[in-house]
Image (spheres, rainbow, N blue to C red):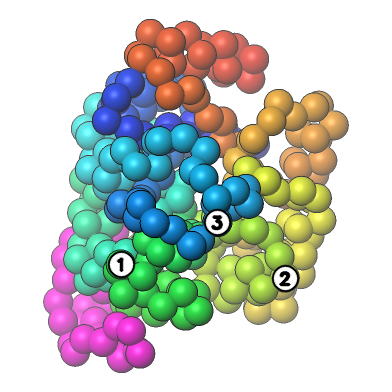
Amino acid sequence: MRNGIVLFTSDRGITPAALAEAAEERGFDTFYVPEHTHMPVHRDALHPTGGEDLPDDRYTRTLDPWVSLATAAAVTSRIGLATAVALPVESDPITLAKTLATLDHLSGGRVTVGAGFGWNTDELADHHVPAARRRTVLREYLEAMRTLWTQEEASYDGEFVSFGPSWAYPKPPQGRIPVIIGAGGGPKTMKWIARHADGWMTTPIETDIAARIALLREEWTEAGRDGEPDVRILVAAKPTPADLAEWEAAGAAELIWGVPDADEDAVLAYLDKTAARLGLA
């Protein structure tokens, strides 16, 4: 399995560029950052952990993911650049398609979009995304962006996205940018992923991961998809050797390890310990 690093970015502590460069030097495969455009003070939506309060104030201080990854791309040459997770429905899809294609072009084809449906429905509402339709909105956004990435004269006609024949360059070096959905692994989500995305990223509170991967594989086959779904596990607690063996046997492709929200020296020391534990060079 590959190994990635996720930084819950904020306007303090280590910068995305500094950590991405250090992670690449230590042999990690992917560098991840999250996204929240803003955080409404008054919120009806519960946090995914079930609480009314946010776990900490980083949710209110999150950096823009694409600017963060661009700074990381400028100081690295190999490590993958990804989100855990981004919220595509909170951006204009035509503009976002251009941003992502440009980042993929300038980084040499290293971008993966880890996307969420959006647990914070109050945040979505400020972007005029109806909570009950957010999966449909995301589906249309992804379909529309893929037309812009792959077609010479792209067009799309949907309920939430519509544009006539258009030219849009650059095209992503990868052909199309992979999309991994970060969401609870229930049957509805697995069916959605098998039809509209390239893989699944676990949530921090996920249980029975191997069984959920098996469900995704069943849906993948049912949808007539070629290849294998790209499964990435966000490690929320120290896994046992049995956990690692089970996940690998189930077909997980990557483990994502978090680092603390701290100054550069503390984060790099933590990164060194993690790399040593994983046997990375």
Q: Residue at x 71, y 65 (%)?
A: 186
Q: Along the horizontal axis of the image, is 90 left or right of 203?
A: left
Q: Nearer the viewer, mark 2 or mark 3?
A: 3
Alpha-carbon distance for marks 3 and 1?
A: 16 Å
Q: Which callout, 2 or 3, points at the residue further toward the start of the chain?
A: 3
Q: Position of residue 169 (x, y in %)?
A: 16, 65
Verify whether residue 81 appears in magenta.
no
Circle 2 residue:
187
Q: Residues within 10 Å of mark 2 (few under 14, many from 20)?
A: few
Answer whether labels 2 and 3 touch (C-beta < 8 Å). Answer: no
Residue 220 visible in rendering: no
Alpha-carbon distance for marks 2 and 3?
A: 21 Å
Circle 1 residue:
126
- Chain part drawn in magenta: 148-174
Image quadrant containing the N terminus: top right
Q: Amino acid at mark 1?
A: Asp
Q: Residue at x 36, y 34 (%)?
A: 9
Q: Residue at x 55, y 56 (%)?
A: 46
Q: Amino acid at mark 3?
A: Leu
Position of residue 241 relative to residue 87, above or below, is above
Q: Which callout, 1 or 2, points at the residue further toward the start of the chain?
A: 1
Tell me, for residue 46, which label it has, or none. Answer: 3
Q: Residues within 10 Å of mark 1 (few under 14, many from 20)?
A: few
Q: Secondary structure at mark 1?
A: helix
Q: Residue furthest right?
A: 242
Q: Secondary structure at mark 3?
A: loop
Q: Position of residue 198 (x, y in %)?
A: 53, 62
Observer-nearest of 166 and 82: 82
Q: Which callout, 3 or 1, points at the residue further toward the start of the chain?
A: 3
